[in-house]
Image: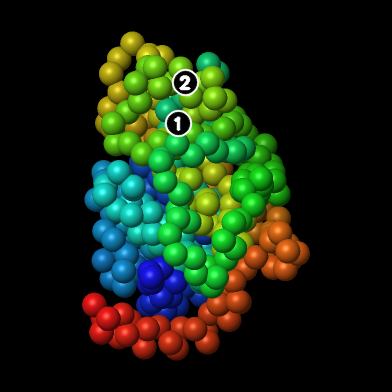
Amino acid sequence: MNYVFEEALEAAAAVKSVAGKPTVGIILGSGLGVFARQIKAPTVVPYTRIPNFPPARVEGHAGHLIFADIGGVRVAVLSGRVHYYEGYGLDTVTLGTRTLALLGVRALIVTNASGGIRDDLAPGDLMVIEDHINLMGANALMGHWDPRLGARYPDMSAAYDPDVRSAILSAGEETRVKLQEGVYAAVSGPSYETPAEIRMLSRMGADAVGMSTVPEVTVATQMGVRAAGISCIANRAAGLSEHKLSHQEVMDETAKASRRFCKLLTAAIPLVDRAVAGKPRADESGKLDRIEAKRNVGRHMKDAGKQKRKRKARR
């Protein structure tokens, strides 16, 4: 038995008073936290002050949950993530995503820094994710199934929601920010891929590769949140460039792309919100995939403290 739902509920309860009613969630990847720093009048809650949240320890990940109004839309921004390769279980990696879902977000934009595999993807390019290949060796939904979190077997055929992707592409046209599209492959890391692995990924149909995003999108899909992803191409993947790969290169290239990234995301938020308004995802049975707890989060918040005490007693 695990307590994923209760832990996310406790986290949501702790920030509910300052959250407002966010409808769009954002997860900022390596080096992309500059977007958070340019938000006006934010409410910033450090992860260390949120129950059950792990601290963000990787360079380029601030570790803040930020609430703000952007373009007339209430947003919740996870500035920094934790990774599977840090030794966390996927329940912990995706706790932030589940918390945003319980707070009521309808759409989630997940961002990352990745290595470009396809020939026309160069460092600094922004790629809207069409689909993904999970090569992490694990799935975020493995383990005990709690029906309060959503379907046991969620359909992933439209995990990267067409309406949300279209809204982001429209924002690119509106702001004249050039966007690529492609398939993202997720590996566990933390070592970069070998040239042979990159050749394999290319033959499998991957256009870019990274070490995140897939767990969050999988969990969002299960909980009925309509997801999209944006990759900032930080380098050419192993064997495709003449120099060795490094995290510093990732940070440098995402910094160069930060102005265009911020411009795109700011324009995309109201378009994404309009794209999902009144259009919740339906599960395979035709009922709303949003869990009952998400629609009535206030009622469940009252039980959070009681559940926490019970868990401590069991331990």
In the rendering, which numbered label is found on residue 209? 1
Q: Is residue 59 visible?
A: yes
User: Would you call the spot at circle 1 few (<14 residues within 10 Å), some (14-19), or many (20 or more)?
Assistant: many
Query: Which residue reaches farthest top?
Result: 242
Question: Residue 314 versus residue 92: which sits nearer the camera?
Answer: 314
In the picture, which quadrant includes the N terminus?
bottom left
Which of disc 1 and disc 2 is earlier in sequence? 2
Label 2 secondary element: helix
Query: Alpha carbon of mark 2 to alpha carbon of mark 1: how far?
Result: 12 Å
Label 1 secondary element: strand
User: Would you call the spot at circle 2 few (<14 residues within 10 Å), some (14-19), or many (20 or more)?
Assistant: few
Question: Residue 194 versus residue 99: which sits nearer the camera?
Answer: 194
Residue drawn 33% across the image and 11% down it: 242
Q: Are marks 2 and 1 in contact (CB under 8 Å)?
A: no
Q: Against 227, is 11 above or below?
A: below
Q: Position of residue 298 (x, y in %)?
A: 52, 84
Please indicate whether residue 198 sits to the left or right of residue 179 in the image: left
Residue drawn 31% across the image and 72% down it: 51
Q: How many marks?
A: 2
Please indicate whether residue 176 sits to the left or right of residue 196 in the image: right
Residue type at tag 1: Val
Q: Position of residue 254 (x, y in %)?
A: 39, 35
**To which quarter of the image does residue 315 belong?**
bottom left
Residue behind mark 2? 200
Residue type at tag 2: Met
Residue drawn 49% across the image and 34% down it: 185
